[in-house]
Amino acid sequence: MIDNGPPDFREYLPTIIKENYGKWQYHEHPRPGVLKHVGPAGALYSIRVGEPRLMSIESIRDVCDIADEFCDGHLRFTSRNNIEFLTPDESKVDPIIERCEELGYPVGGTGHSLSNIVHTQGWVHCHTPASDASGIVKAIMDDLYEYFGSEVLPNKLHIAMACCLNMCGAAHCSDISIVGIHRTVPRIDHESVRKNTEIPSLVACCPTAAIRPDPKNKSVTIVDERCMYCGNCYTMSPGMHIMDAENDGLAIMVGGKVSTARTDPSFSRMVIPFLPNNPPRWPEVTEAVRHIVEVWIENARKGERLGEWIERIGWERFFSISGIPFSDKLIDDYIFSRETFRTSSAFKF
Ligand code: SF4
Ligand code: SF4
């Protein structure tokens, strides 16, 4: 039996994209939420709307109905959880926007605006979250909603949320990132490790070699000072309890970007080491994110991404202008950092 993999994506492209493929000439941005890409065969209009990230079958059917009615069935889900309806017909732009707004899908996320927020799985699905993902993102997006459909920011704003240090979202390279953090060494349930765990895999999964086999007890031990609270071991064994209601919380990082426009891509750096995990609306986190956004709006030059502005004025001035206290927790003093493959988002001595 041969696995031929997925079908060739070119089969599914709108005709206008096939015809302009490799020959695009320029693009324009006629209004918030609408992009126009032009090539020799004509223009393609993309109408961008925010989607709720976790979607019901009914919602997906609604969205597909819009694409069937106006776009010959063509749409795309972007990497930042937006939906773009694609049409070469300018007269369809307004009806698409109307239909999306009727269904409650906001139009925006283009140009100098807040794009939809990327997030990981949180309490809905994953093993190791220190906090929720979709709940926090909902609270932040509700608070910053005014910046999705307008274009009043200095440049685009990408926000990401990852609910543990494994950061399977885009937290390392977004303008503002919220990261769930554990702060305690896993508590070992030896009985569960003995009964439910492949011990060599558990030992091998630890990125800092903190887990050592304990053959006498048919279990493992942890060298506490080597642990960086990543939670990988809990993925391998239900006996490695990493969740801690009191000590788990959230850190905030800023200044990352993927784009090569104007300046090189950059990693984000941690600026707030800990905020409490306070569901259902996480007021401390939403307030901190809004504060950073407002300080950026007030002080950056037009066209500067958050990290570009900070690089120009210097991180010291960022802390003083924003009033965010610089703390020793933002400095990388992890004693084994040179022995491991660990890279750091923290400031160095
Ligand atoms: Fe799971 Fe961590 Fe990814 Fe969250 S960030 S979904 S806890 S691996
Ligand atoms: Fe190792 Fe991470 Fe488990 Fe700590 S939490 S013991 S660093 S796998």
Image: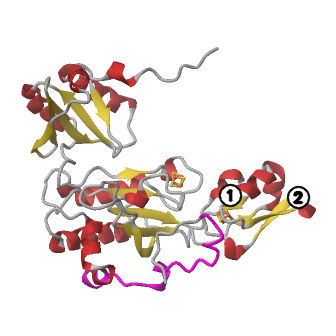
Q: Which residue is mark 1?
A: 233
Measured in 3D between alpha carbons, the distance from the residue under mark 2 to the one under mark 1, in whole angstroms, is 16 Å
Write down the quadrant of residue 280 in the picture. Answer: bottom left
Q: Which residue position holds label 2?
A: 218
Tell me the residue at 17%/35% (across/down). 102
The stretch drawn in magenta includes residue 326? yes
From the image, which quarter does the N terminus lie in?
A: top right
Per the image, label 1 sits on a secondary structure element best described as helix
x and y, in percent, of residue 101 in the image: 17, 38
Residue at 24% x, 82% y: name it: 321
Main SS type for the magenta part?
Answer: loop
Image height check: is 305 above or below 259? below
Is residue 335 one of those drawn in magenta? yes
Whether residue 136 is visible: no
Binning the other alpha carbons within 10 Å of mark 1 as few (below 14), some (14 to 19) or many (20 upward) gives: many
In this view, 190 is above or below 322: above
